[in-house]
Image (cartoon, grey):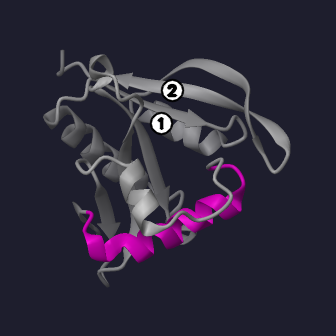
């Protein structure tokens, strides 16, 4: 099977949110408990650095995008990574292809640090990020509640060697 990475387009919104819903349903991918509206999703992510991965049938099977970590100018080059795959495609090695594209594009847009905050029980995602050049910088304890339970987050980051 062949796969193609392309820029995320407005007509991808429905499929992107369907895949995000799978992440919500997993209970280990996000603090979100309800699917946001298309408008809310779009305003929370940067307009640049949005990518999808399609299969042979031109169906979106995964996506990635960046969120700003702050509105302060001094942090303009720091963003948080979101990357999600349809459950049928998790663990097939496709995430690295998509994340590498996001990293390259983020550097072209002047980002010097990418970060990701992951629930400790999402060990596969932590290993995936580490395999792709992210390092663990710490654990934030009881940072928020999900379904009434306090959750920790493992913070990982990747510092670009190309953007200064």
Q: Which residue appears farthest toward the left when viewing the image? A: 108
Q: Is residue 2 visible?
A: no
Q: Which of marks 1 and 2 is in front?
A: 2
For disc 2, the marked residue is 156
Foreground residue among 130 and 120 = 120
For disc 1, the marked residue is 129
- Label 1 secondary element: helix
Foreground residue among 105 and 144 = 144
Question: From which residue to which does the magenta span run?
Answer: 8-29
Asked whether, in this view, residue 26 is left or right of residue 58, the answer is right
Marks 1 & 2, CB-CB < 8 Å contact:
yes
Residue 54 located within the stretch drawn in magenta:
no
Foreground residue among 62 and 141 = 141
Residue 20 located within the stretch drawn in magenta:
yes
The correct choice, above or below, for 116 with respect to 45 in the image is above
Work out whether mark 1 precedes mark 2 in sequence or the reverse, and give the earlier one. 1
Query: Residue 62's x, y, as percent?
Result: 41, 63
Kindly identify the residue that appears in the image at 43 percent across and 67 percent down: 38
Kindly identify the residue that appears in the image at 38 percent across and 25 percent down: 158
Q: Residue 118 has which mark?
A: none
Kindly identify the residue that appears in the image at 20 percent across and 32 percent down: 107
Q: Is residue 8 visible?
A: yes
Q: Is the magenta stretch mostly helix, strand or loop?
A: helix
Query: Residue 147's x, y, as percent?
Result: 81, 51
Kindly identify the residue that appears in the image at 62 percent across and 49 percent down: 30
- Label 2 secondary element: strand
Asked whether, in this view, residue 79 is left or right of residue 130, the answer is left
The correct choice, above or below, for 141 with respect to 29 in the image is above
Question: Residue 23 appears in which quarter of the rendering?
Answer: bottom right
Question: Residue 73 appears in which quarter of the rendering?
Answer: top left
Foreground residue among 142 and 136 = 142
């Amino acid at each position: 099977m062949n796969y193609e990475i392309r820029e995320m387009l407005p007509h991808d919104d429905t499929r992107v949110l369907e895949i995000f819903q799978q992440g919500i349903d997993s209970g280990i991918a996000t603090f979100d408990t309800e699917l946001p509206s298309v408008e809310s999703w779009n305003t929370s992510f940067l307009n640049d650095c949005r990518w999808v991965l399609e299969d042979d049938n031109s169906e979106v099977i995964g996506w990635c995008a960046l969120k700003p970590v702050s509105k302060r100018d001094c942090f303009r080059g720091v963003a948080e990574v979101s990357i999600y795959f349809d459950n049928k495609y998790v663990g097939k090695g496709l995430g690295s292809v998509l994340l590498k594209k996001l990293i390259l594009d983020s550097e072209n847009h002047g980002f010097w640090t990418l970060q990701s905050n992951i629930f400790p029980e999402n060990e596969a995602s932590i290993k995936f990020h580490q395999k792709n050049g992210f390092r663990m910088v710490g654990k934030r304890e009881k940072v928020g509640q999900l379904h009434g339970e306090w959750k920790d987050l493992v913070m990982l980051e990747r510092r670009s060697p190309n953007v200064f």
